Image (tube, rainbow, N blue to C red):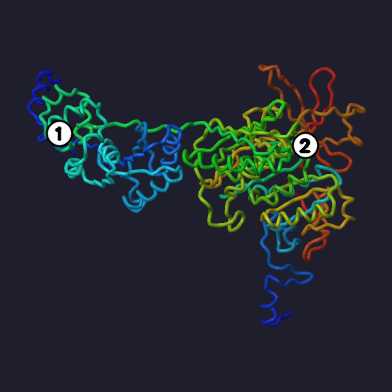
Amino acid sequence: MLPAPHQQRIEVTRAPLRGVSRAPAAHAQANELWAGVHLPGIDEEKLAGLAERAQRFTPRVSLAPPDGLLLEVRGSLHLFAGVAGLRAALTDECRHLQVQPVLAFAPTPLAALTAARAQRALEVLQAAQLIGALAPLPLSALRWPPDTLERLQRMGVRTIGAVLRLPRAGFARRFGAAQLAMLDALTGRTPDVRAAHQARARFRRRLELDYELQSHALLLAALTPLFTQLGAFLEARQCGVVELECRLTHRQAPVSRCVLRLASPFSDAQRLSELFGGQLQALHLPEPVRACELRAAALVPYAPECAALWQPGEHGGGAGRETYGFIERLRTQLGPAAVHGLTLLPGHRPESAWAVTGPPPVAPARRAAPEPGPEFPAPQRRPLWLLTTPRPLGVRDGLPRRRGPLRLVSEPERIETGWWDGGEIARDYYTALDIHGVRLWVFRERAAPHGWYLHGVFG
Amino acid sequence: MGVDPKLARLLAHPGVWRGRSAALLQVLPTGFAALDGQLPGRGWPRTGLIEILIARFGSGELDLLLPTLAALTRAAAARWCVWVAPPFMPFAPALASRGIALDRVAVVNGARPLWALEQALGSGACDVALGWARRPQAREIRRLQLAAERGRTLGVLFRPRHAAREPSAAVLRLTLAPCAAGVRITLLKGRGAHGSVELNPLA
């Protein structure tokens, strides 16, 4: 049954501001601990930057504009040697951005933020001690409207402790329900849900060069800070990139674009920079470069690989990380189509029984166990080499020739299929030996001119 | 003939090898007992470059390697099996039916086959790399051999038969030609290896 509105009102009128029937901890969400960071004089951009950097402490970071940051750190305490260690690490992080933070720890986000804004380095780990610790804080830290604060001051209410002792109903009537809700969130009486800061999913950084550069090597060196930033950006998101674009701005010529496409996600800035260097070498620069911009779109979640105990090839050690680097190196130098894998198709025609897999198959790091046997046992003997298009053979006396007469050494195998998709074939395949003893796979068309073709070579 | 046990112990040292006998080295069984008996260490070397000299493609050179390739690609922590600049398209159904795990096979084509082969050998990402090169220089073969040692990879270079006259840094060289019994393999160079053997790689 839903509670009737008047019942709720009765509860409001009876209870003092500080809940008696329900302990404050009842709603402090499942044992949270919030770090409130007050950053006087920070601008919006720096705050967002700090929020991104702060994601290395906890995934639950929320902004409290204009000058506050909140982190839920209960789960991170043991990683940073407790509150003291975390405080030191967070302070360090802020000093990188040239801001002096005030840090407070409390079980509710608003309490942590209020304490920090009141310049108190509060450390309250237990919900039961929260109200006692908040009581001496000045009311101004709550950032209520000035007239509200002034009226409260005239009533002799100057601290949070004093305002919490006022009757709820009267307070709500005089100062507004919003202020009451804020006090409830402050003490943990009602849950205070904070939206987690969503880091930007695109990387885009521009670098104006001090000098115009024409040399590829110097350009790559100049791009190093951008790659370092990209590495930090990807690490914070646990993501990799599969496509990286660099735009090089010239004085007059149109912008040169250098695009690196990868078969598997990469997050290591060092390796990305190496691969990009290979790609850059191939780029023709019409004019010296004045500025560059590095863009990465389409982030892909990246599972970092464990380093194996054994080196590749040692005691059966797998290829590990080298696999990706090797294939990428070949692709950047020789072109994306130069490297491919092979796969089977369930087709009966020799042409349609296999396919090239576009990007090279990304090798699984380690297979559970070798498979017991071939998946597609070939019914007949097939050559190890296939000519992608059959090559016509010379004919004398109705028999095929290639560097001399061919000797047919097998029974014919008829392959007659594909009428449904236009690729209809009707052929009799033979194994043939040429005069040098090379075994060939040849066929004779069953249709009118009965031509002979070479289609494969046995290994 | 009895050998002094002290001498036998000395000769068993991996750093010592005699003209006829081979030093202890890590090998891969070829799958053919007759060939194993002829090769130093009784198998293909685990790392290093071998050269197979053939008069024309399809002389049986792939059949000879298939048991080794199948074993390597089916191993639990198999690395790549790379084919650099093959003369034709490797026919996937035939490879699969001969036991090769296709998900470990990568084919590389392009303008610089020797460079690609060196990358494959030296990267450590490959168990075996097969290469077909038109006219590699002696210095390039030396680079391939060093790369294979560096990457702990077996490299196989297929070259025309007349290259037998040229010197080569490969650890093992052999010529292969079709014959009535199958193929005839003649060892040209190898640590303590010489002689020839006839076998049927399809048997």
Q: Quadrant of the N terminus of chain A?
A: top left
Residue A330 marker: none
A71 vs A386, left or right, is left
- The x and y percentages for residue A80 are 37, 51
Q: Is residue B174 visible?
A: yes
| Mark 2 lies on residue | B88
- Seen in the picture, residue A210 relative to B76 is either above or below; the reply is above
Callout 1 environment at 10 Å: few (<14), some (14 to 19), or many (20+)?
Answer: some
Q: Secondary structure at mark 2?
A: loop
| Mark 1 lies on residue | A157
- The x and y percentages for residue A191 are 24, 32
The alpha-carbon separation of the residues under discs 2 and 1 comes to 90 Å
Q: Quadrant of the C terminus of chain A?
A: top right
Do the residues indicated by labels 2 and 1 lie within the same chain of the protein? no
A310 vs A378, left or right, is left
Q: Amino acid at mark 2?
A: Phe
- The x and y percentages for residue A334 are 73, 38
A411 vs A81, left or right, is right
Please state which of residues B63 and A446 is positioned toward the viewer in this rendering: B63
Picture residue at 54% right of the left edge, 30% below the top: A298
